[in-house]
């Protein structure tokens, strides 16, 4: 076996291990958390958009903090800790929240109307999930596509559109929790 | 427990071509690359992603530890002992040099023949 062939085979072995190590970096519990928040909060927009706004004004940041805690516990439980990866996740989702706040600001200032703001926020969430799926957790790519489909659906559904969106995305999040990638070792 | 000094006979050295003899074993190379990409990994996690047996993984981790490339910290989780491994500075330098040599080898092999 010459040096080149050995090197290639060794690198394939390394590559496979790296792939296995990054099959899932977010715990299922985070998807369950956001599934519950989505199911509870989105239908409120069909009742009264202000209620939905207030709900997510609290649930969003609290959910974000809880997600960080769950992520850190998961990393310790599966035995793989990386501050770089943790900060990638934190920066990504914080950036999404900042973008959403920007749209909320536009709505509050009257620059855009409430229904438009809601759809823009849904589009931001779809984009955030999709890009997260590219470099964080692959399952989120599908969540991004699902959320985008809901965004498109809003142009055609004019009754209980937020309730339907909440159920669809919530179901997607629960499916991601159940089936999205390997769970990692449960041994510590 | 005092950590024993690395055995000089087991300390890795390059073979003149820039390759580190320790990393010529694919499992040790894999361990080093995984540790370079993370702050630390537990023994169980390394076993999970490499698919190796306890004995083989343990033996190779010990070789890396004896060479001063890897540090081990023992903690308890749910009253069970957990060994956490991380790559030392010496390990990072050695890995970087070894990977550079690998890259050069592959680039040389891919050059079109004159």
Image (cartoon, rainbow, N blue to C red):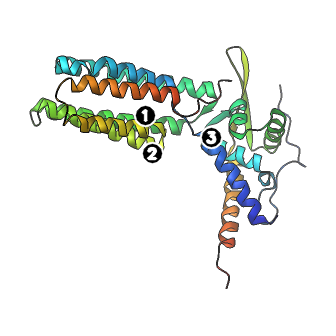
Mark 1 or mark 3, which has the lower sequence index?
Answer: 3
Q: CA distance from mark 1 to mark 2?
A: 16 Å
User: Which residue is under mark 1?
Assistant: A90
Task: Please tell me which residue is depicted at 36% across the width and 40% down the height of the picture.
Answer: A145
Mark 1 or mark 2, which has the lower sequence index?
Answer: 1
Q: Which mark is residue A56?
A: none
Circles 3 and 2 in contact, beta carbons < 8 Å: no
Mark 1 or mark 2, whichever is nearer to me:
2
Say which quadrant the C terminus of chain A sits in.
Answer: top right
**Disc 1 element:** helix
Q: CA distance from mark 1 to mark 3?
A: 22 Å
Q: Estimate how packed mark 1 is, as few (under 14), some (14 to 19) or many (20 or more) residues with alpha carbons within 10 Å.
A: some
User: Which residue is under mark 2?
Assistant: A134
Circles 1 and 2 in contact, beta carbons < 8 Å: no
The chain letter for the residue carrying disc 1 is A
In the figure, residue A7 lies in which quadrant? bottom right
User: Which residue is under mark 3?
Assistant: A20
Task: Residue A138: give x, y in percent of width and height.
Answer: 48, 40
Task: Please tell me which residue is depicted at 62% across the width and 39% down the height of the picture.
Answer: A21
Task: Residue A13: give x, y in percent of width and height.
Answer: 70, 50
Say which quadrant the N terminus of chain A sits in.
Answer: bottom right
Mark 1 or mark 3, whichever is nearer to me:
3
Circles 1 and 3 in contact, beta carbons < 8 Å: no
Q: Left of A101 or right of it: where is A63?
A: right
Task: Residue A33: give x, y in percent of width and height.
Answer: 42, 21
The chain letter for the residue carrying disc 2 is A
Task: Please tell me which residue is depicted at 29% across the width and 28% down the height of the picture.
Answer: A165
């Amino acid at each position: 076996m010459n040096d080149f062939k050995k090197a290639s085979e060794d690198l394939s072995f390394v590559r496979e291990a790296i792939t296995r190590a990054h099959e899932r970096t977010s715990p299922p519990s985070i998807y369950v958390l956001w599934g519950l928040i989505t199911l509870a909060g989105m239908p409120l927009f069909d009742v009264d958009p202000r209620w939905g706004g207030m709900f997510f004004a609290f649930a969003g940041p609290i959910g974000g903090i809880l997600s960080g805690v769950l992520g850190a516990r998961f990393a310790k439980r599966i035995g793989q800790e990386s501050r770089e990866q943790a900060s990638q996740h934190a920066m990504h989702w914080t950036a999404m929240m900042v973008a959403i706040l920007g749209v909320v600001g536009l709505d509050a200032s009257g620059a855009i109307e409430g229904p438009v703001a809601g759809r823009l926020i849904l589009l931001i969430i779809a984009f955030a999930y999709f890009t997260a799926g590219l470099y964080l957790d692959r399952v989120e790519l599908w969540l991004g596509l699902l959320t985008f489909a809901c965004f498109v659906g809003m142009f055609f559904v004019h009754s209980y559109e937020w309730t339907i969106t909440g159920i669809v995305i919530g179901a997607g999040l629960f499916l991601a929790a159940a089936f999205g990638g390997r769970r990692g070792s449960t041994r510590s | 427990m005092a950590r024993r000094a690395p055995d000089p006979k087991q300390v890795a050295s390059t073979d003149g071509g820039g390759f580190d003899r320790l990393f010529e074993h694919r499992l040790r190379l894999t361990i080093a690359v995984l540790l370079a990409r993370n702050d630390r990994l537990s023994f169980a996690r390394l076993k999970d992603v490499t698919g190796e047996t306890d004995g083989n993984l343990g033996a190779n981790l010990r070789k890396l530890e004896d060479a001063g490339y890897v540090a081990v910290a023992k903690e308890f989780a749910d009253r069970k002992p957990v060994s956490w491994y991380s790559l030392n500075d010496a390990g990072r330098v050695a890995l970087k040099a070894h990977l550079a040599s690998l890259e050069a080898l592959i680039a040389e092999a891919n050059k079109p023949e004159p």
